[in-house]
């Protein structure tokens, strides 16, 4: 399976994917490209170090949003992916891309959807809101991408306990280590090896 990873920042989830492929936790998968909307994203450096094509498509390089969307889709198409992985990609995915790659785009979100998701819930903001609300358990979700924001079918979730002295930064790190870096590689491996199924209610799940 050919997978392209799209990311806007440091690329810690990208690194988790690369490490899982190296360690044999993800099989039958090749990262065929890493695409970022930010030229200074460290994820591009991670890709280059791993020998993976690194592509930047910056909104600032285009006069209109449509031109940017077209260039982004062209970059994805050039990688000829079987799967698109959104790993901290802070750009609204063009509708044409969602239509063209229907059922082939997954996203990692740092909460237990449907809690703390949707517009404005990304990165550290999620963990700030979680702590402000006083919930006792948070986590991460891998879901398929549809036209909405964090509304696509859920594939995997993993819970993470909240500690009394957590700060947003400490909680963010624990959610990454205990949930995101675990379930995103697991989801990719399951998709690559045909181990995802729908139950009687039409919900997706991973088989062991």
Image (cartoon, helix red, strand yellow):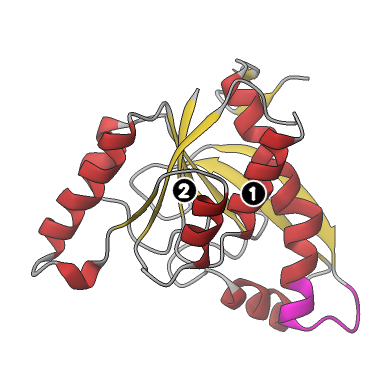
Q: What is the crowding at mark 1: few (fewer than 14 residues within 10 Å), some, or many (at least 20)?
A: many
Q: Is residue 200 toward the left or the right of residue 57 in the image?
A: right
Q: Is residue 176 toward the left or the right of residue 36 in the image?
A: right
Residue at mark 2: 151
Magenta highlight range: 163-171
Residue 83 placement (x, y as % from top left): 45, 31
Residue 41 versus residue 178 in the image, above or below = below
Q: What is the crowding at mark 2: few (fewer than 14 residues within 10 Å), some, or many (at least 20)?
A: some
Residue 153 makes an appearance in the image: yes
Residue 108 versus residue 119 in the image, above or below = above
Residue 134 makes an appearance in the image: no
Real-space Cα distance between discs 2 and 1? Answer: 11 Å
Q: Residue furthest right?
A: 164
* Helix, strand or loop under label 2: loop
Q: Marks 1 and 2: in contact by CB < 8 Å?
A: no
Which one is in front in this view, the residue at disc 2 or the one at disc 1?
Answer: 1
Residue 158 versus residue 32 in the image, above or below = below
Residue at mark 1: 141
* Helix, strand or loop under label 1: strand
């Amino acid at each position: 399976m050919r997978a392209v990873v799209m990311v806007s920042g440091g690329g810690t989830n990208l690194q988790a994917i690369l490490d899982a492929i190296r360690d044999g936790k993800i099989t039958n998968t090749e990262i065929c490209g890493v695409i970022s909307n930010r030229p200074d994203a460290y994820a591009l450096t991670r890709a280059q170090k791993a020998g993976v094509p690194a592509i930047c498509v910056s909104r600032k390089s285009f006069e209109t949003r449509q031109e940017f969307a077209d260039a982004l889709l062209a970059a994805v198409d050039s990688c000829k992916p079987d799967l698109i992985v959104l790993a901290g990609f802070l750009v609204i995915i063009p509708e044409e891309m969602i239509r063209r790659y229907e059922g082939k785009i997954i996203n990692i979100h740092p909460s237990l959807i449907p809690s703390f998701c949707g517009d404005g819930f990304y990165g550290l903001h999620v963990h700030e809101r979680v702590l402000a609300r006083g919930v006792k358990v948070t986590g991460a979700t891998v879901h398929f991408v549809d036209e909405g924001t964090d509304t696509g079918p859920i594939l995997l979730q993993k819970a993470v306990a909240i500690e009394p002295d957590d700060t947003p930064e400490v909680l963010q790190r624990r959610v990454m280590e205990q949930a995101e870096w675990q379930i995103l590689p697991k989801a990719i491996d399951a998709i690559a090896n045909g181990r995802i199924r729908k139950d009687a209610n039409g919900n997706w799940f991973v088989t062991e």
